[in-house]
Image (spheres, rainbow, N blue to C red):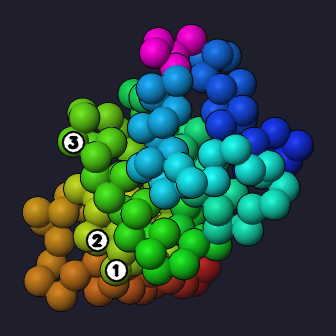
Amino acid sequence: PLLYGDLSAEENLHFYGRMYGVPTLDARIAEVLGLVGLSSRRRDLVRTFSRGMQQRLAIGRAILHDPDVLLLDEPHTGLDQDACTMLDDVLRQVAVRGRTVVMTSHDLARAQELASRFDILTRGRIQASVQQTDLPADGLLAFYRQTLEASAQEQKEARS
């Protein structure tokens, strides 16, 4: 996840923070390490971290400079349940700050809890979009299945 194993968690964030010109960098690093639950490991080399800890630090790196848009590809992968809950809290905080989070996920239940809009992709194209408020009563999984069935039917008709 674009981290340097021979640097500590703190040194990695310091490196990226300087690249982005983050003001009050030391305070921001302390805040981010707290958000991702790695304050006590801030001076440990990243190569000693588990996969989940590296994933948490990578998420910290991604939010360090407070980007307007945060792009995440399956961010819950490799995280235990506590870390998933921490990530959900971080993503909610990012959204509350008025930032946009674009996330791919196969975990539809978790996505339904977090997102305000859903795009269903099939074969690399947006097949359907729906706002959280417009989801059918049976939820995102049902909407997803309906979208896939409609897509399969369209493909079948196109072949005939």
Please report whichever mark, 1 or 3, sits nearer to the chain's N-terminal start: 3
Question: Picture quarter containing residue 99?
Answer: top left
| Pointer 2 with pointer 1, Cβ within 8 A | yes
Return the mark for residue 96.
3
Write down the region rendered in magenta: 21-25
Residue 109: image tag: 1
The answer to whether 76 is drawn above or below residue 47 in the figure is below
Residue 61 placement (x, y as % from top left): 59, 39
Locate residue 45, reporting x and y percent.
80, 49
Q: Is residue 147 visible?
A: no
Task: Specify which label sits upstream in the sequence, 3 or 2.
Answer: 3
The residue identified by callout 2 is 112
Mostly what secondary structure, the magenta segment? Answer: loop
| Residue 142 as seen in the image, left or right of residue 19 | left
Vertical comparison of 137 with 12: above or below = below
Could you tell me which residue is drawn at 29 percent across and 63 percent down?
A: 114
Q: Is residue 107 magenta?
A: no
